[in-house]
Image (spheres, helix red, strand yellow):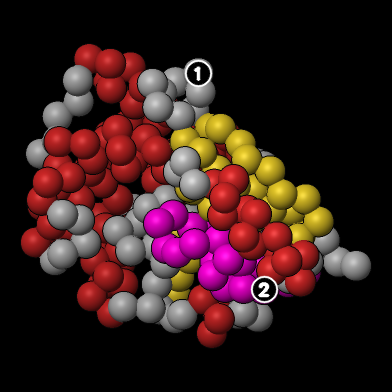
Amino acid sequence: MADLTAEEAIAAEKIFGGRLDLATRYVEHLATSGIERGLIGPREVPRLWSRHVFNCAVVAELIDNGARVADVGSGAGLPGLCLAVARPDLYLTLIEPLERRVTWLEEVVMDLGLNNVEIVRARAEAAVGKVECEVVTARAVSALNTLVPLMIPLLGGQGELLAIKGRSAAEEIAKAANTIKKFGGVQTEILVAGAQILAEPTTVVRVKVARR
């Protein structure tokens, strides 16, 4: 199990509050069955909280109250399950095509008793028109130029895309500029989430989408 350092414990309390016990159980799943089934690499255990869970959960500060969120390529629930635990007011649809990952997600959701999560086994493009959301998220799925055509159609013409990125965010935006415009993106910006909580805040590309 990935134990919290003193600094991480403070951050965890700020991010999850009274739902920290659920977050801890989620990390336990990641550190055990998540590794056994190949969703997380064993070397990631010491940094599950800092590099993965915190990195994803702080994105919640960018999402409006009560929003419906679709998470593309959920995998180990990053960021989908992190958001669902941190923000019970949100409704999360986790979109994941691989059966073994879907099975794991279903087991974790059931164990944590999360009633604000739906899991859809499908590729993102197959889920268009079947999922209702105002926000669509993704982490470590692919470059923005590839992500945009998968994510924006899920919004049905209006909403926003939140993609967790790293140092290449500005470069990815430049390369994807034409694609973003083609799919209805009207405003693109790089945001930082968790700046008041984490030593290494999360970089997020936000693309706002509106009907023309």
Mark 1 = which residue?
196
Q: Amino acid at mark 2?
A: Pro
- Residue farthest toward the bottom in the current orientation of the protein: 126
Q: Which residues are magenta?
A: 135-159
Tell me if I can see residue 150 in this picture: yes
Residue 28 coordinates in the image, percent (x, y):
17, 44
Snapshot quadrant of residue 55: top left
Which residue corresponds to mark 2? 153
Quarter of the image with the N terminus in it = top left
Vertical relation: 142 (above or below) 50? below
Residue 208 horizontal/vertical position (percent): 74, 53
Q: Are marks 1 and 2 in contact (CB under 8 Å)?
A: no
Q: Is 192 included in the stretch rendered in magenta?
A: no
Quadrant of res 170: top right
Left or right: 41 as drawn, with respect to 120: left
Most foreground residue, 28 or 170: 170
Q: Is residue 51 left or right of residue 156?
A: left
Specify whether residue 151 is painted magenta.
yes
Query: Which residue appears at 65% of the width and 80% of the height?
Result: 129
For badge 1, the amino acid type reads Gln
Q: Is residue 130 left or right of residue 105?
A: right
Viewer can see residue 94: no
Where does residue 40 sit, x and y in percent of width and height?
20, 56
Q: CA distance from mark 1 to mark 2?
A: 33 Å
Instruction: Name the secondary structure under disc 2.
Output: helix
Q: Secondary structure at mark 1?
A: loop
